[in-house]
Image: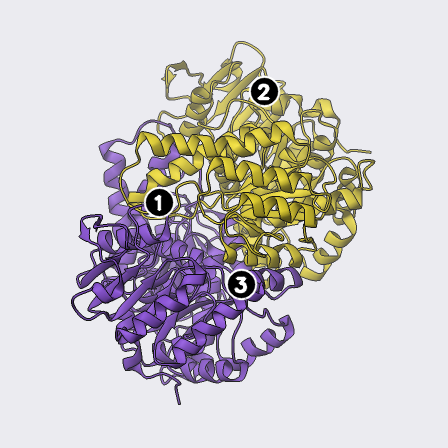
Chain colours: A purple, B yellow
Amino acid sequence: MARLKVEDFAPIFYPKSVAVIGASPDLEKFGGRVVMALKVFGYKGKLYPVNPQEKEIFGLKAYPSINDIPGPVELAAIGIPARGVPAALRQCLARGVKAAEIFSSGFAETGQEEGRRLETELGEIARDGMRIVGPNCFGVYCPAGGLTILPGADFPKESGPVAFMAQSGGFAGRIGQVARGWGIRFSKMVSYGNACDINEVDLLEYFAQDPETRIILSYIEGVKDGPRFVDAVRRTSQIKPVVVWKAGLTKAGSRAVSSHTASLGGEERVWEAFFKQSGAIRANNMADLLDTAVAFLNLPPSPGTRMGLVGGGGGLGAEASDVCERAGLSVPLLTPQSLDKLRAIIPGAGTSIQNPVDVGSPIPSAKLLRSALEVVAADPNVDTIVLNQFNLFGWRPVPTPYSKEDEQRGQELREVPVDFKKTFAKPVIVVEPLFPKDIEMLHIEKENRLTRDRCLQAGIPVFPDLERAIKAYANIIDFYRKAGSPHAA
Amino acid sequence: MARLKVEDFAPIFYPKSVAVIGASPDLEKFGGRVVMALKVFGYKGKLYPVNPQEKEIFGLKAYPSINDIPGPVELAAIGIPARGVPAALRQCLARGVKAAEIFSSGFAETGQEEGRRLETELGEIARDGMRIVGPNCFGVYCPAGGLTILPGADFPKESGPVAFMAQSGGFAGRIGQVARGWGIRFSKMVSYGNACDINEVDLLEYFAQDPETRIILSYIEGVKDGPRFVDAVRRTSQIKPVVVWKAGLTKAGSRAVSSHTASLGGEERVWEAFFKQSGAIRANNMADLLDTAVAFLNLPPSPGTRMGLVGGGGGLGAEASDVCERAGLSVPLLTPQSLDKLRAIIPGAGTSIQNPVDVGSPIPSAKLLRSALEVVAADPNVDTIVLNQFNLFGWRPVPTPYSKEDEQRGQELREVPVDFKKTFAKPVIVVEPLFPKDIEMLHIEKENRLTRDRCLQAGIPVFPDLERAIKAYANIIDFYRKAGSPHAA
């Protein structure tokens, strides 16, 4: 049984009114940034800045105290110094406020007696009937509720099926920023800091039931109740992928998480066992979280392990073969019929089309690429196609500014995987390097991003390099195997 | 004893005249691209296009045959179909041409009898007195000689201390493009394909002696003579770092390298032993090659293993600690004196400054960052400082266009590590995420690249993420340990 009911989260994700305790006209202060972030993001409910010194903050009427606010308040967003937080929360509780997000730091993470005592008080207030996110966090992003985290003023307003719970506010901010370009949209994101009340298990149990959430990502520094966490992950993994990035596994990392969110890091071997037994998908960094989300969002359940690699360049093919095989995927020989067809399409092809299929040029014509993909799609030995290094503007014989002709060529090439996806049932993955180059080459990267965006819109997963693509792909295969999904091959 | 003398390479790297056999006015053909690439890159010697049908190619007088060229020819660049290559080479040999680079494919890599026979002929011609690069390659880039590889028209004209030998032309092209932005400049780059004559050992022995080369990077599909290669790497590694990316270690990869450059992949465990015994630095992809070069170019010999991590954000610090400790580096506690000083500088700092040092904001003021760095620089427990996620424009409370004020702030912050480097002997590493975001955010990335370029100009190594930074750093520590350098701590 979950500790909290789904309804308990309503004032956290969909509050009809928010009071900002410690609101400020100063954008250097958290209390200023909260108001601005909610305003810019477009919170639609009642927004009440609370500050005894101000009449108005960013065009909104300010109130001297929570008690001066005319209507009901569902969520309090708190940015005042730590020692004032318990009293402010008690006032909120008395006023009927159901939930709070506490941005302030200065609690147990300080390692000081006073901070620990203050945090204990927060826990007591929670038990008296208030749900608390934080302290020492960046709060909640829920586009459907019109809420955003502290650094989330420009986060997307559209919702999506990905949930993210992060003990680090910085990572929540960063993933929101980066995920935009990768077509990842969120149902909810919660930066929950020290977790004095709502913790990783509560959130997981909520996300498991949340119909808006299909994929759960997490960054965790420490868990409050190990057995309950393992149990929650195991149950949730039967129905939704749970991706866990656990930090603080080394001695130095453990010390760092302790001073960050007062968490116990935990031993590496305990967590190794956790990943083996719980069904969680392991992530080691931000890229793993993003890539796994891209894979689940854009690939069918239980795809196969036999990869067909298509690209321009033999070195690329050698690298790709090593990467696939190391990840437990196979790169089978194509059938003799396919080889004959490819030899008719690709000039001068010898054995370089057996799989990987070297299309002979890093920038093939759209016609050639289209025909080659169709042959591989028809080959019975291949489950999934990887279009490797789909780098439209990688190599130009003369370095001149892009012409209309170049642009047109790029557009044509860009439609090849999109048309393929419409016509064939076989999944296709695009690998497009977005390797940071020098400033003068930003226009090339812009073209590459247009391709990325076009593919993602069409439901084709795109990754910035092959290793990341294959790791994410292997993750989804592994998930459906363990979950014993009805889709499993 | 090296098989070839240093002088043998003079016509390959510094030819006074080049004949392009198979020159063409068609840029879709290799013979067209070669002439254009050399012309655009600015080859200063005599350039002779050879084509019986053309009078002029890209403004250069064309010659019907090699025998019609008036002066001496040192290097032949060959782009005609495979079966014509031996006869053309014989003509060149008779004409006194010393060396050739053969772009044409259709040799042993086809797996066909005819291709193998043709390649055997090339070997015989080489033994008769001609040095050959290739076939099935993109040739030679040597800025001091005015030469560039097929896709290298826009490669930098300045030389640098990095040599790259690559059995893949595609990777040579790609590294040249990407390396620009990372401040890496090359002495020589050789795409050597099937290696019918000049192979990895010849090149290694040359680079070992080449005074223009300090760091050797390689992408290898197969070696012709294992024991000789191991011996050459072992000897060279005593004086210069040799970074080896070996492809074709899995079954599928081995098949791919065989059809790419007719190489034998080799067993993974044999190569494991090679990396343990030879002193070579192992790379697994393009990023490893680039990062290791950046580290060697910008760090002193034998830096220490005690890292001081400075950044804005607790999650970041936890991740960084794990990454360092897993790489065998330590993140020691700062001295009580340092902690006192940091507490006076960073508002509200509790234990979050023990190391990692959380400066409290992802975008601290230049003044705060400068002071914090100085404290860590003075701490006797720290050898090297990592300025982690130096992301100037990561989080803005209001998403507005950049103002003059923002620009100025960015410029100030950018000078902090640069000034630090001028004042303190302790090495500093900058980690600046260049995570590909969406198209509207390209201007943020432009700002980040300005920072990257400014730091690299000042001799400060920059990496796009912490894992890559630490991996490269660990590589250089390992190199000096094994080489038993006189600088070793």
Q: Amino acid at mark 2?
A: Ala
For the residues beneath circles 2 and 1, the answer to whether they share a chain is: no
Examine the rendering and report whether any part of residue B398 can be seen. Answer: yes
Disc 1 is placed on an element classified as loop
Q: Residue at x 57, y 52 (%)?
A: B467
Q: State which quarter of the image contains the N terminus of chain B.
A: top right
Image mark 2: chain: B
Q: Amino acid at mark 1?
A: Pro
For the residues beneath circles 3 and 1, the answer to whether they share a chain is: yes
Nearest-to-viewer mark from 2 and 3: 3
The answer to whether B443 appears left or right of B148 in the picture is left
Examine the rendering and report whether any part of residue B80 can be seen. Answer: no
**Percent of width and height locating residue B50:** 46, 21
Q: Residue at x 76, y 54 (%)?
A: B276
The image's mark for residue B144 is 2
Disc 2 is placed on an element classified as helix
Residue highlighted by disc 3: A109
Tag 2: Cα neighbours inside 10 Å, few (<14), some, or many (≥20)?
some
For the residues beneath circles 2 and 3, the answer to whether they share a chain is: no
Disc 3 is placed on an element classified as helix
**Percent of width and height locating residue A149:** 33, 59
Residue highlighted by disc 1: A364
